[in-house]
Image: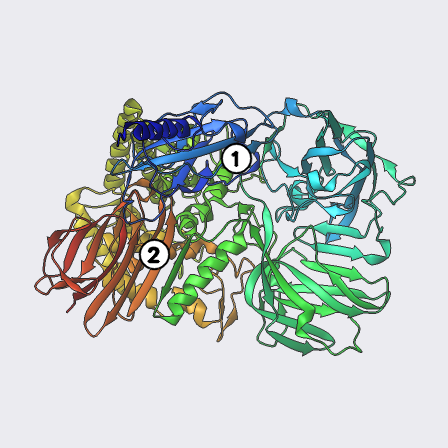
Amino acid sequence: MNKKPIFNICIVIFLSLCSFGLTSCEEQTSLEKATDLTISEGFKNPLGFYDAEPTFSWKLPVLDNNKSQSAYQIVVASSEDLLPDNADLWDSKKQDTDQSVWVKYDGKSLESRQKVYWQVKYWNQDEDASAWSDTNHFELGLLSNSDWQAQWIGLDTKKENVVGSQQNIVHRPQYLRKGFELSNDVASARLYITAKGVFDVAINGEDVSDDVMPPGYTPYKERIETITYDVSDLIESGQNTIGVEVAAGWHSGRLGWMKSLWIDTESPKMICQLELTMKDGAKEVIVSDETWKGTTNGPIRLSEIYDGETYNANLEMPNWATNNFSDKSWDTVSTFPVGNTIRLEPKRHTTVKNKIELATKALIKKEGTLIFDLEQNMVGVPLLKVPMKKGQTLKVRFAEMLSPDGTFYTDNYRKALSTNYYTASEDGVIEYLPKFTFHGFRYVELSGFDASVEPSKDWVTGIVQYSDFDENGTFTSSHEKLNQLQSNIVWGLRGNFFDIPTDCPQRDERMGWTGDAQVFGPTSMFNADVYKFWASWMQSVRESQYENGGIPFVVPDVLYNNKVSSGWGDVCTIIPWKVYYRTGDTTILEENYEMMKGWVAHHKATSTNYISSMNSFADWLQPYPANGNNKGDTSHSLIGTAFFAHSTKLTAQTAAVLGNTQEQAKYEALFKAIANAFENEFFDETGKVKEVSETQTSYLLALAFGLLSEDKQANAKKHLLQTIEAADNHLRTGFLGTPLLSQVLDETGEIDLMYKLLFNETYPSWFYSINQGATTIWERWNSYSKDEGFNPMSMNSLNHYAYGAIGEWMYERIAGIAPLEAGYKSIRIAPKPRAPLTSASASVNTPYGKVSSSWEIVNGEFNLEVVVPPNTTATIIIPGDAQEDLVLNGSSFTGNSDLKIIETNTWFYELLAQPGTYKLKSKIN
């Protein structure tokens, strides 16, 4: 039988399949497709995106045959139908590289409103190709002021009000609305909107989003962020109505602890642009303009960030944001042009959301009031479901702790009234959730309810609010108080990442204090997916930089005093570098490099022969200060010079990463000059601090920042240990010194001492506050004690994340996960177990995937389980006696292609691991 015709037919069929794209003539796809596709700082399919030059990232699926990537191809198109073969915006072609993160877009220019689709495929280490990924997309917002046809609109909302003994201006919330008619069916609709203030928007009576107090907080004199909503499902053919509530928020509200900061403010305003594409292809645009109507006679009478919200249900306007409402008695709004002075730009990180619900755990009856205890200090608002009689006014107060006699402790709120009021319009159970304020609290006190009804714990539910990021890491151990410390760190983060990184969430500040931010940044990145959060805030830092290069105390700057502080302003070099090292994305360095150089120049301008004379908050809230000052005992000049050197070094490192070798050399030389001057000015020949106060922080700065010659480092370490011993092996560090304590003791081999400091129970220590009942990190080491009560200072926040910086050491050294190369491309797994711990574990989502380390000591054996994500490698250092067998997955181990032994000695094994899961066991002494 002649088989040749059959063979020819098979060839024809195969070629036909190729031509229809049903198979590939070049290669068969055998690998699973890439996952977790994101753009820029981790956005997934964003709407109203800010970046017309994004980067692309993806993860390799966890497969036995997927160790690393050898190549990728990205395709980008204006229509999903064009992918993957006819990409009209960009086809990267096959790129032979292991880069799977932060790949820069290199295609056609993108424009406002444009929707973009993209896919990626990869080849593994064996040159096997994956299938194309699922199609992802992003849609750009309005990128320029020229895109806006709308105008700012609003009413004059100013009203005099008394706060304490001071008269000030407040603004009544305003209700703005417009009806419009469409003669055609809508295919798609985008609402672009923002406010000078905060807003909530509804269309045809339906809430457009669940955002909390959008658009958020930026340097309003420079930039206001806009938000894009897909409202296609809310628009109807025929009559429609859009309604917007606008309140003062950060823009027009009382902000700051001094009357001079809020004596008079601009009335809030709103701008929106509804762009409609009809099913027949026609376009229509509805804008905010002089045709809108408004009133301030709505149910929200007052709403301030510090002082709370007043709501009168008798003034409710049913259906006011629907077609079934007459606004004839309302006022015509005033209009204001967009102009070019203030930039309108799409929001570049996530809005605040309602994230967690906390049930009341205990109910206390006290003198005609009810106190609801959530047993967790939190930030947000209470959801109230309370029985009331018509005409009653419910008073709602807040506190972080109760005084020993059971009364509310509110001295630490200072001038922030933090009180809500609700007036009932009828008998029955009211349901009320404040809209334009937030509070820091654990306890809620109610008075003015229907006393004839038996109280119930379900009257109050805590609604925890913070920027809408996900958890990024986990940590747990065998020690209950260490686990509570981890919980306190996480809750401190949640409580103070309310659109910006705040110092505290309860008193009359809630500002972006730069010093607090720079010490807590690395810890925050382990716990939460906050790259976009930090990148956004760093833009605000750049916009707030003074012309002389100085960085304000707070960002956004509301003080406008042109003053700076060493250790605070250095946030502009420290955060970009720390973020880069944990993400591997050079964009954060590119965006901030000029600011970094400007700050170093400002340092230099405020120094003489490299010795700083810059103002400083210094080692803020150091315990037991000899001078009784909040700034502690460490020399301001020493601190300023040390941070001058450190920022210069980070700027040199940034120049190196960005490939600017000339400026790298310039800043490296400057660093050496500053370090030499620092050593000569502040340290004698024995490595001891001279001429200024000898403190733990003075040695920590010198050693952590590499400011001493090699011959003096060992002696400086001895003097540091002496200062710790003189303090009965307790810390004596404030905001600037505390984050360096674990770093220096670790690098100098004093792991046992660091464990001692961490596990101390008495003041000052991390566990001291836990022993006093803390559920968050406190501002002071002694904000409260069961024996002595509250610290007498009114600056006494019980939710202040700075001392939570210890979390970085917990994750990187107790659990043992740290980047060896920027972005965790190379990982170190090197736990440092010590008593009283018998186990610890952590995981973190890196740009390449989840890495985890979990160890336990059982009967003299050290058990370590490690997960290394694809496209990375890990150096694993496991304690153990190298004379005993190392066990892998239950069997004696001497090395293989995935896990190689690099070094052994009496104390540890050092291994090089390819991606995979490893269960190791060693004998320890």
> Residue 567's image quarter?
top left
Most foreground residue, 148 or 597:
148
Helix, strand or loop at disc 2?
Answer: helix
> Residue 724's image quarter?
bottom left
Residue at left offset 65%, top offset 77%: 364
Q: Is residue 418 left or right of residue 907?
A: right
> Which residue is most to the left?
883
Q: Position of residue 194 (x, y in %)?
A: 67, 36
59 over 285 or under it: above or below: below
Residue at left offset 25%, top offset 41%: 707
Question: In which quadrant will I find the N terminus?
Answer: top left
Q: Position of residue 604 (x, y in %)?
A: 37, 31
Q: CA distance from mark 1 to mark 2?
A: 34 Å
Q: Is residue 247 left or right of residue 223?
A: right
Q: Evaluate whether residue 272 shows in this view.
A: no
1 or 2: tag closer to the N-terminus = 1
Q: Position of residue 311 (x, y in %)?
A: 78, 56
Most foreground residue, 489 or 904:
904
Q: Position of residue 774 (x, y in %)?
A: 49, 67
Q: Amino acid at mark 1?
A: His
Most foreground residue, 220 or 166:
220
> Which residue is most to the right?
328
Q: Evaluate whether residue 13 shows in this view.
A: yes
What residue sits right under mark 2 in the picture?
Answer: 811
Q: Amino acid at mark 2?
A: Tyr
Helix, strand or loop at disc 1?
Answer: strand
Residue at left offset 39%, top offset 48%: 522
What residue sits right under mark 1 in the picture?
Answer: 137
Q: Is residue 703 left or right of residue 60?
A: left
170 over 269 or under it: above or below: below
Q: Is residue 821 left or right of residue 373?
A: left
